[in-house]
Image: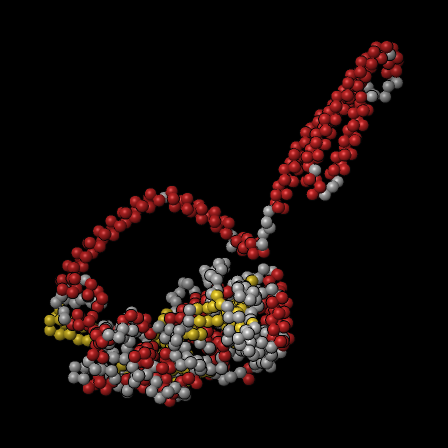
Amino acid sequence: MRLLAARGERDRTEAQLAAVQSGGLLARTRDWRQLQRLRGLLHQQQEEMLTALEEQVQRNESLLSRFHRSSEPKVAALEAEARYTREQIAGRDHALAEAQRAREASSADLSTAIAEQETVQQRLLAAEAAPRATPTQLALVKQADRHHLPAQYERLQSLRRRVAAEASARSRLEKEHAKAHDDYDRLRRDAEATVIRQARLIATTLARLRTADVLLDGPYDVVLIDEVGAATIPETLLAVSRAMTTAVLLGDFMQLGPVLPKPITDSKRADVQRWLCDDVFGMCGITVAADATAHPGCTVLDEQHRFGHDVMHAANAIAYDGLLRAAPTIPKRDSDDPEIVLIDTDRLGDLATVRATGRTKGWWPAGALISRALADYHRSRGETIGVITPYNPQAEATLEALRDREETSTEPTEVGTAHRFQGREFDVVVLDLVEDGGKPRWIAQASISRGGFAREGLKLFNVAVTRTKSRLYLVGSRHRIAGAPPDTALAHLAPLLGDPIRTVPAERLITAPSVAEPDRPALGEFGSDLADILAQHVRVAEIQDEKQFYETFTEHLNSARHSIWMWATWTTNRTRSVAPVLADAIARGVQVIIFVRDARDHLQGTANAQQNLATLRAAGPIIVEMYKMHQKIVVIDERVVLLGSLNVLSQRQSREVMLVMEGAHFARKILEHESAAQFRQSPPICERCCSTTTLALHRTKEGWRWRCYARVADPANTRAATCGWSASPSEPIGGDMAISRSLR
């Protein structure tokens, strides 16, 4: 009876436990104390049932023993008829005992599992209560995994531990190195002073002369100063004062003067202008060729041995008034081998538009692209080449473009401003004028008669032109040269266009693949070779209709893996075909940033354009509106750049050309100039009218600023007014740009 009662109690407890466990997660969490109580009660009832069962077994065994003794005669009689032997029965008893032990072990495992389940449930509840990761955080984790940042961090920690362990040894070695360096300097100075005092010929720089006592002490019988035009007057006088009998100054009055700090060049003091901003030639009254030939103390070396007759003719026209003459060893060039070639950038569209970086300076993609192609062309022929440009930003852009092509194992093409190359010479010189058909810049203003900035520009132009030995390339607008004002350097080149200056239109070098061979422009052997080289740097995709545009452009967008940067002035109906492709890119983790004109533009402000802009916003990219934007650029994954006449969100002409340039360095240069990294966040919320869709970027003297152009009612003004709230953009966001360094 006790066993039956215990079994009944257990069944009721199991039913109650099943009822509680059948509820949802929240109910189970709420009733977890009752669950624990029922499980404990069930375990207790099972133990009681086992105890009752054991007592029943003992009673049964006692009864069996009595029954066995009384029934032994019967058992003996029935053994012959028994189905199982005693050994078999013993085996089954043993199996039953093993099963009981297994049951006990299972009960223990069940208790452990229940405890672990409780722990997991608590952790699950805590995880569900914690804040969930944002899409940005998930993207950062994905990016960190893609770049193996956890492993790199572990390596960084290992290296830091190693550095810390070797800090004492490093400190000791640094002290030993410093002592050895001091000993070396002392011994070198002693040896140098002895050698200089005993030498009969000493070559040094003016800077070294004025800082080394052993050189300044002299004296010298004769002092020769080379490139004296690049020295200041005090430096020159100091060197001349060391001469005992003779001082000879060697130089060119049309070469670049000394490079001086801006506070000195901007100074209005008469003594600073006379002694520091002028050179020896100016002090002696030698500013043009006639002054040099007329001066009694000046000997003119008019025979040159470097470049050919055509470059000499150009140099005479620009700077020397016919003074130069060619040495007898300089041969005449064949007409099929032009000495001066103008790569005409007219009609290249946005590719040949100068991006201003100052009042007169800037850079343009055309120069970097053409210089890169010319460097490939002549380096493959074993010729030395120097690329010269007036501005550091253009030199940097060209260097970035060359880095995408040149092997690290080869000597890089030399690129720089004319100051860097004064006194140098190359087989081939590329002079990138950075002059389009718009605002005249430094070279367009260069003039020998205007003085100051214009005269320095002419000197720069002259230095660049006279660095070549075999061929000179001019990269710039033919229209600018042909229409140059009469007293400028470019005006002296205008009569030479055609003969001897050969013109190669850059637009003819960039021909769409669909143009049949008979219809391709006749470029001659040189032009055809250059076009082939250029084709290795840029692909041309010709767009004949809307369907072909969609197919071509979609192919590029679908290749994006990390980022898409797009500058498109207007959003018309073409936007509807592009928006779904951009939405797909965003869905696969690509960051998309689009720059368009703001609604104050007469085309972008139309209802249709604004509706298309809304469609574009719905696709999910970051939209940045800009005031008076002209760029038409697409940069994909900071490696592929699309340029040309193509306006990817609006234009619907019968024929467009999409130029595709590949190269991470050049792409980053484009993004850096456009300040892309600064605008990786969505525009802010206007703090005055709370608008999020009427903020546009304005370029001011202080830099970029957001400005709200939302229309607001002004009781004091019958005309509609704008909100006018403005703010500076936030700091650039880190990531794979530095601009990437990674927009960088």
Percent from the top left, x then y, of residue 70? 86, 10
Which residue is depicted at the point 48% across and 66% down? 727
Percent from the top left, x then y, of residue 642? 53, 71
Which residue is depicted at the point 47% across and 65% down? 728
Residue 594 quadrant: bottom right
- Foreground of the two, 633 or 721: 721
Residue 244 quadrant: bottom left
Residue 450 quadrant: bottom left
Percent from the top left, x then y, of residue 698? 48, 71
Q: Is residue 315 left or right of residue 193?
A: right
Name the image quarter holding the N terminus. Answer: top right
- Foreground of the two, 488 or 714: 714
Q: Relative to residue 704, is residue 339 depicted above or below?
A: below
- Foreground of the two, 414 or 730: 730
Residue sitting at the far left: 244
Percent from the top left, x then y, of residue 592? 56, 65
Which residue is depicted at the point 82% across and 14% down? 63
Which residue is depicted at the point 33% across and 46% down? 170
Count of numbered labels shown in the rendering: 0
Q: How is the image coloured?
A: secondary structure
Residue 327 visible to the viewer: yes
Residue 405 visible to the viewer: no
Q: Is residue 435 left or right of residue 514?
A: left
